[in-house]
Image: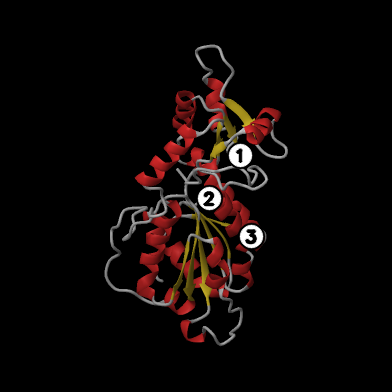
Amino acid sequence: MHRFSGKRLVREGVTDVFGYPGGAILPAYDAMLRATRSATSSCGTSRARRTWRDGYARASGKVGVAIATSGPGATNMVTGIATAMMDSSPIVCITGQVGSKLIGSDAFQETDITGITLPITKHNYLVTRAEDVAPAVREAFAVAQSGRPGPVLVDITKDAQQGQLRGRLGRGRAGSAPRRCDDALPGDGDVRDAIELINAAERPLILAGHGVMLSGAERRCCALAERAQIPIAVTLLGIGGVAGVASAEPRHDGHARRSLGQQRDSGSRPADRARHAASTTASPATSRPTRATPRRFTSTSTAPS
């Protein structure tokens, strides 16, 4: 790993790293201390690390970075990774792994963390060569931030961390990746289909989620509601986004505000009534929770932006 991974973190604008040291990740710690000035926060427990990095990403808008050793250190991150996946928090988790020649031999604290986290990450990597560490970290940051944000895991074997490299680190800009990372975004055809469905709806409703806030589309969502004369309800994580803009900008004709408040079991009564009366629900940037959207509803879109 040497100084390359540390410099890669600097290029990505990392200033804070949350971690809990262990034998399989100590070479990475040494590399960071030599190459960066990042503040490394040692969490009181390995389980606290998953909360700290998630909260950091939400509060700062930057990618949260967490580091853990192999085995229990890595598995203790699983709940936090799943939370970041569900709530669209951009985080990069770097874990240590046993030497590449020991993988599959049931070595001390060997755990298939890439297999465990495959369903709850946007992407993950198993790096076994020193020359692949920096490119994997670079791409991990790009994937975590692109499209719908989420968690990415980079599992690095101990021999890859200890490997020595010659030459200079490529000067790829922060957040750039060698491949397209937004393939999951809706195309023009999807948007046209959604527009036609909304226009044909007798009683449409917009259910705005957390992704509206993440993409900075609060005012656009309110403008759509005003133009199409559609009320807006929000999910739990969408509170403070669309609702705040709609409340601050009431309609000019004196009619009631478009925002109905939170829609869920514990939400507002107007939002609850609207969800039962709506014929079509447009759900931009929400995971479409079943508790908020009955099965008989038609959701036009769950796209991240």
Label 3 secondary element = helix
Please rate how many residues cluster around mark 3, counting C-alpha atoms within 10 Å: few if below 14, some from 14 to 19, many from 20: some
State the separation of the CA atoms marked 1 and 2: 16 Å
Q: Residue at x 62, y 47 (%)?
A: 289
Where residue 261 appears, as percent x and y from the top left, is 63, 30
Q: Which residue is mark 2?
A: 89
**Disc number placed over residue 235 in the picture, else none:** 1
Where residue 8 appears, as percent x and y from the top left, is 38, 60
Where residue 115 appears, as percent x and y from the top left, is 54, 72
Q: Which residue is mark 3?
A: 79
Q: Count all numbered tags in the image, as a single digit.
A: 3
Nearer to me, 7 or 245:
245
Looking at the rendered structure, the kind of residue marked 1 is: Thr
Q: Tell me the quarter of the image containing the N terminus.
A: bottom left
Nearer to me, 248 or 291:
291
Q: Residue at x 51, y 33 (%)?
A: 201
Looking at the rendered structure, the kind of residue marked 3 is: Thr
Q: Nearer the viewer, mark 1 or mark 3?
A: 1
**Horizontally, is 198 left or right of 106 in the view?**
left
State the separation of the CA atoms marked 1 and 3: 22 Å
| Disc nearer the start of the sequence (1/3) | 3
State the separation of the CA atoms marked 3 and 2: 13 Å
- Figure check: 185 above or below 25: above
Where residue 161 appears, as percent x and y from the top left, is 44, 74
**Horizontally, is 260 left or right of 177 in the view?**
right
Q: Residue at x 35, y 53 (%)?
A: 174
